[in-house]
Protein backbone atom coordinates (compact mmCIF):
# COMPACT_ATOMS: atom_id res chain seq x y z
CA UNK A 1 0.00 0.00 0.00
CA UNK A 2 1.39 3.39 -0.97
CA UNK A 3 1.63 6.37 1.34
CA UNK A 4 -1.20 8.01 -0.61
CA UNK A 5 -3.39 4.91 -0.19
CA UNK A 6 -2.70 4.80 3.55
CA UNK A 7 -3.56 8.49 3.78
CA UNK A 8 -6.85 7.96 1.93
CA UNK A 9 -7.73 5.00 4.20
CA UNK A 10 -6.97 7.06 7.29
CA UNK A 11 -9.14 9.94 6.06
CA UNK A 12 -12.02 7.53 5.39
CA UNK A 13 -11.64 6.01 8.87
CA UNK A 14 -11.78 9.46 10.44
CA UNK A 15 -14.92 10.31 8.43
CA UNK A 16 -16.76 7.21 9.67
CA UNK A 17 -18.94 7.87 12.72
CA UNK A 18 -18.42 6.07 16.03
CA UNK A 19 -20.70 3.21 15.04
CA UNK A 20 -22.20 0.65 17.37
CA UNK A 21 -24.01 -1.06 14.45
CA UNK A 22 -25.99 -0.31 11.29
CA UNK A 23 -28.92 -1.96 9.53
CA UNK A 24 -29.84 -1.60 5.89
CA UNK A 25 -32.61 -2.73 3.56
CA UNK A 26 -32.29 -2.66 -0.23
CA UNK A 27 -34.88 -2.40 -3.01
CA UNK A 28 -34.86 -6.19 -3.48
CA UNK A 29 -35.63 -6.78 0.22
CA UNK A 30 -32.12 -7.80 1.28
CA UNK A 31 -31.35 -6.88 4.90
CA UNK A 32 -28.06 -6.79 6.75
CA UNK A 33 -26.67 -5.73 10.13
CA UNK A 34 -23.10 -4.52 9.87
CA UNK A 35 -20.48 -2.12 11.25
CA UNK A 36 -20.19 0.32 8.34
CA UNK A 37 -22.49 3.13 7.25
CA UNK A 38 -24.82 1.74 4.55
CA UNK A 39 -24.91 3.49 1.15
CA UNK A 40 -27.32 6.40 0.96
CA UNK A 41 -29.22 4.72 -1.91
CA UNK A 42 -30.52 1.91 0.35
CA UNK A 43 -34.29 1.80 0.70
CA UNK A 44 -33.96 2.12 4.47
CA UNK A 45 -31.06 2.59 6.91
CA UNK A 46 -30.83 2.42 10.72
CA UNK A 47 -27.59 3.84 12.12
CA UNK A 48 -26.85 3.42 15.83
CA UNK A 49 -24.10 5.70 17.17
CA UNK A 50 -21.86 6.09 20.17
CA UNK A 51 -22.34 9.80 20.82
CA UNK A 52 -19.32 9.88 23.11
CA UNK A 53 -17.15 9.39 20.02
CA UNK A 54 -16.23 12.72 18.42
CA UNK A 55 -16.48 11.06 14.99
CA UNK A 56 -20.22 10.54 15.56
CA UNK A 57 -20.69 14.23 16.36
CA UNK A 58 -18.73 15.17 13.25
CA UNK A 59 -20.80 12.79 11.10
CA UNK A 60 -24.05 14.20 12.48
CA UNK A 61 -22.82 17.70 11.66
CA UNK A 62 -21.47 16.99 8.18
CA UNK A 63 -23.28 13.95 6.76
CA UNK A 64 -26.65 13.37 8.45
CA UNK A 65 -28.37 16.46 6.98
CA UNK A 66 -30.63 16.91 10.03
CA UNK A 67 -32.62 20.09 10.63
CA UNK A 68 -30.99 22.36 13.25
CA UNK A 69 -33.41 21.61 16.10
CA UNK A 70 -33.09 17.83 15.55
CA UNK A 71 -29.31 18.07 15.35
CA UNK A 72 -29.27 19.91 18.68
CA UNK A 73 -31.51 17.28 20.27
CA UNK A 74 -29.23 14.48 19.06
CA UNK A 75 -26.03 15.89 20.50
CA UNK A 76 -27.28 17.46 23.74
CA UNK A 77 -26.00 15.61 26.82
CA UNK A 78 -29.16 15.06 28.83
CA UNK A 79 -31.79 12.36 29.20
CA UNK A 80 -34.98 14.39 29.64
CA UNK A 81 -37.70 12.87 27.47
CA UNK A 82 -38.95 15.16 24.71
CA UNK A 83 -39.76 15.30 21.01
CA UNK A 84 -39.27 17.84 18.24
CA UNK A 85 -40.69 18.08 14.70
CA UNK A 86 -38.95 20.07 12.00
CA UNK A 87 -39.79 19.63 8.33
CA UNK A 88 -40.03 15.91 7.54
CA UNK A 89 -37.91 14.88 10.54
CA UNK A 90 -38.91 13.78 14.04
CA UNK A 91 -36.48 13.93 16.95
CA UNK A 92 -36.97 12.09 20.25
CA UNK A 93 -35.18 11.48 23.51
CA UNK A 94 -36.52 8.36 25.25
CA UNK A 95 -35.68 6.83 28.62
CA UNK A 96 -33.83 3.56 28.93
CA UNK A 97 -31.79 1.99 31.70
CA UNK A 98 -28.05 2.15 31.34
CA UNK A 99 -26.10 -1.07 30.95
CA UNK A 100 -23.17 -1.34 33.34
CA UNK A 101 -21.23 -3.80 35.42
CA UNK A 102 -20.93 -1.82 38.64
CA UNK A 103 -23.66 -1.74 41.28
CA UNK A 104 -24.05 2.03 40.90
CA UNK A 105 -25.21 1.58 37.30
CA UNK A 106 -28.22 -0.54 38.31
CA UNK A 107 -31.38 1.51 37.96
CA UNK A 108 -29.62 4.51 36.39
CA UNK A 109 -31.68 6.03 33.59
CA UNK A 110 -30.06 7.21 30.38
CA UNK A 111 -31.36 8.72 27.18
CA UNK A 112 -31.72 7.19 23.73
CA UNK A 113 -31.53 9.98 21.14
CA UNK A 114 -33.56 9.32 17.99
CA UNK A 115 -33.93 11.07 14.63
CA UNK A 116 -36.39 9.76 12.02
CA UNK A 117 -36.76 10.92 8.45
CA UNK A 118 -37.89 9.16 5.25
CA UNK A 119 -35.59 6.22 4.62
CA UNK A 120 -33.48 6.71 7.74
CA UNK A 121 -33.50 6.35 11.52
CA UNK A 122 -30.50 7.43 13.58
CA UNK A 123 -30.23 6.39 17.22
CA UNK A 124 -27.46 7.29 19.61
CA UNK A 125 -26.42 7.13 23.25
CA UNK A 126 -23.69 8.62 25.42
CA UNK A 127 -23.56 5.57 27.72
CA UNK A 128 -24.34 1.94 26.82
CA UNK A 129 -28.05 1.15 27.13
CA UNK A 130 -29.89 -2.15 27.62
CA UNK A 131 -32.07 -1.62 24.57
CA UNK A 132 -29.33 -1.47 21.90
CA UNK A 133 -28.37 -5.15 22.23
CA UNK A 134 -32.04 -6.14 22.01
CA UNK A 135 -32.59 -3.99 18.89
CA UNK A 136 -29.67 -5.69 17.18
CA UNK A 137 -30.70 -9.19 18.26
CA UNK A 138 -34.21 -8.68 16.89
CA UNK A 139 -32.91 -7.32 13.60
CA UNK A 140 -30.55 -10.29 13.26
CA UNK A 141 -33.28 -12.79 14.16
CA UNK A 142 -35.50 -11.75 11.28
CA UNK A 143 -37.59 -8.81 12.46
CA UNK A 144 -36.72 -6.59 9.50
CA UNK A 145 -38.47 -3.19 9.45
CA UNK A 146 -39.14 -1.86 5.96
CA UNK A 147 -39.09 1.81 6.89
CA UNK A 148 -38.67 4.31 9.72
CA UNK A 149 -42.23 3.71 10.97
CA UNK A 150 -41.57 -0.01 11.37
CA UNK A 151 -38.26 0.69 13.10
CA UNK A 152 -39.92 3.11 15.52
CA UNK A 153 -42.55 0.48 16.34
CA UNK A 154 -39.81 -2.06 17.16
CA UNK A 155 -37.87 0.54 19.12
CA UNK A 156 -40.84 1.53 21.30
CA UNK A 157 -41.81 -2.09 22.02
CA UNK A 158 -38.27 -2.86 23.18
CA UNK A 159 -37.89 0.30 25.24
CA UNK A 160 -41.22 -0.04 27.04
CA UNK A 161 -40.69 -3.73 27.78
CA UNK A 162 -37.09 -3.20 28.86
CA UNK A 163 -37.87 -0.17 31.01
CA UNK A 164 -40.81 -1.88 32.70
CA UNK A 165 -38.70 -4.93 33.58
CA UNK A 166 -35.93 -2.71 34.91
CA UNK A 167 -38.41 -0.90 37.18
CA UNK A 168 -39.59 -4.29 38.43
CA UNK A 169 -36.04 -5.47 39.12
CA UNK A 170 -35.33 -2.33 41.13
CA UNK A 171 -38.55 -2.83 43.14
CA UNK A 172 -40.59 0.06 41.73
CA UNK A 173 -43.65 -2.09 40.97
CA UNK A 174 -46.05 0.83 40.55
CA UNK A 175 -43.80 2.34 37.89
CA UNK A 176 -43.41 -1.07 36.22
CA UNK A 177 -47.20 -1.47 36.13
CA UNK A 178 -47.64 2.00 34.67
CA UNK A 179 -45.01 1.29 32.00
CA UNK A 180 -46.52 -2.01 30.83
CA UNK A 181 -50.02 -0.49 30.79
CA UNK A 182 -48.66 2.27 28.56
CA UNK A 183 -47.15 -0.38 26.29
CA UNK A 184 -50.50 -2.17 26.01
CA UNK A 185 -52.23 1.10 25.13
CA UNK A 186 -49.80 1.62 22.24
CA UNK A 187 -49.44 -2.00 21.05
CA UNK A 188 -52.34 -4.10 22.38
CA UNK A 189 -51.29 -7.20 20.40
CA UNK A 190 -47.77 -7.60 21.84
CA UNK A 191 -47.97 -10.53 24.31
CA UNK A 192 -44.95 -9.74 26.49
CA UNK A 193 -46.50 -6.51 27.73
CA UNK A 194 -49.32 -8.61 29.19
CA UNK A 195 -46.95 -11.30 30.47
CA UNK A 196 -44.72 -8.80 32.24
CA UNK A 197 -47.73 -7.02 33.68
CA UNK A 198 -48.82 -10.43 35.05
CA UNK A 199 -45.33 -10.74 36.60
CA UNK A 200 -45.75 -7.31 38.17
CA UNK A 201 -49.04 -8.39 39.74
CA UNK A 202 -47.31 -11.56 40.88
CA UNK A 203 -44.68 -9.52 42.69
CA UNK A 204 -47.53 -7.49 44.20
CA UNK A 205 -49.06 -10.80 45.39
CA UNK A 206 -52.28 -10.17 43.43
CA UNK A 207 -52.97 -13.66 42.12
CA UNK A 208 -56.28 -12.95 40.36
CA UNK A 209 -54.77 -10.09 38.33
CA UNK A 210 -51.70 -12.19 37.56
CA UNK A 211 -53.92 -14.96 36.15
CA UNK A 212 -55.98 -12.45 34.16
CA UNK A 213 -52.94 -11.01 32.40
CA UNK A 214 -51.30 -14.39 31.87
CA UNK A 215 -54.40 -15.46 29.97
CA UNK A 216 -54.32 -12.27 27.89
CA UNK A 217 -50.64 -12.87 27.13
CA UNK A 218 -51.14 -16.47 25.99
CA UNK A 219 -54.15 -15.44 23.88
CA UNK A 220 -51.66 -13.32 21.89
CA UNK A 221 -48.72 -15.72 21.81
CA UNK A 222 -48.87 -15.98 18.01
CA UNK A 223 -47.76 -12.34 17.89
CA UNK A 224 -44.37 -13.10 19.43
CA UNK A 225 -41.51 -11.51 17.53
CA UNK A 226 -39.27 -13.95 15.59
CA UNK A 227 -36.53 -15.21 17.88
CA UNK A 228 -38.52 -14.61 21.07
CA UNK A 229 -40.13 -17.33 23.18
CA UNK A 230 -43.05 -17.06 25.54
CA UNK A 231 -41.71 -17.47 29.10
CA UNK A 232 -42.88 -20.38 31.23
CA UNK A 233 -44.88 -19.04 34.21
CA UNK A 234 -44.48 -22.37 36.04
CA UNK A 235 -40.78 -21.65 36.50
CA UNK A 236 -41.00 -17.86 36.79
CA UNK A 237 -39.99 -16.57 40.24
CA UNK A 238 -42.67 -13.86 40.05
CA UNK A 239 -45.32 -16.55 40.56
CA UNK A 240 -43.45 -18.79 43.00
CA UNK A 241 -45.72 -17.87 45.92
CA UNK A 242 -48.78 -19.07 43.99
CA UNK A 243 -47.51 -22.48 42.93
CA UNK A 244 -49.22 -24.34 45.77
CA UNK A 245 -52.56 -22.63 45.08
CA UNK A 246 -55.06 -24.89 43.28
CA UNK A 247 -56.65 -22.00 41.36
CA UNK A 248 -53.30 -20.87 40.02
CA UNK A 249 -52.21 -24.40 39.11
CA UNK A 250 -55.49 -24.90 37.25
CA UNK A 251 -54.89 -21.66 35.36
CA UNK A 252 -51.41 -22.83 34.32
CA UNK A 253 -52.87 -26.12 33.11
CA UNK A 254 -55.38 -24.19 31.02
CA UNK A 255 -52.59 -22.03 29.54
CA UNK A 256 -50.54 -25.09 28.67
CA UNK A 257 -53.48 -26.48 26.72
CA UNK A 258 -53.83 -23.33 24.58
Image: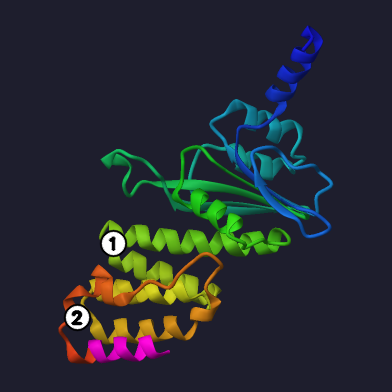
Residue 134 spot, x, y in % from top left: 50, 54
Residue 125 spot, x, y in % from top left: 53, 41
Query: In front: 9, or 89?
Result: 9
Seen in the picture, residue 216 relative to 228 is either above or below; the reply is below
- Figure label count: 2
Magenta stretch in the rendered image = 248-258
Circle 1 packing at 10 Å, graded few (<14), some (14-19), many (20+), is: some
Query: In front: 136, or 112?
Result: 136
Q: Earlier in the sequence, mark 2 or mark 1?
A: 1
Q: Is residue 57 left or right of residue 96?
A: right
Seen in the picture, residue 249 relative to 128 is either above or below; the reply is below
| Label of residue 242 in the image | 2
Q: Is residue 170 left or right of residue 51?
A: left
Real-space CA distance between mark 2 and mark 1, rounded to the nearest whole angstrom: 21 Å
- Reading the image, the residue beneath label 1 is 172
Q: Is residue 255 left or right of residue 40?
A: left
Seen in the picture, residue 129 relative to 170 is either above or below; the reply is above
**Secondary structure type for disc 2:** helix
Residue at image x 22%, y 92%? 247
**Secondary structure type for disc 1:** loop
Amino acid sequence: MTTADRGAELRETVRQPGLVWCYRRTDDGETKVEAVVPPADCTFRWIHLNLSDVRSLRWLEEEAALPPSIHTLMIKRDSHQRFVFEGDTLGLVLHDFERGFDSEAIGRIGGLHVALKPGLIITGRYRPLHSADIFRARLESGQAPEDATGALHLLLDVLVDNLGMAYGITGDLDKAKETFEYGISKDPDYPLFYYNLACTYGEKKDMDKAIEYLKLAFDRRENMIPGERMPNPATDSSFKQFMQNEKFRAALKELKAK
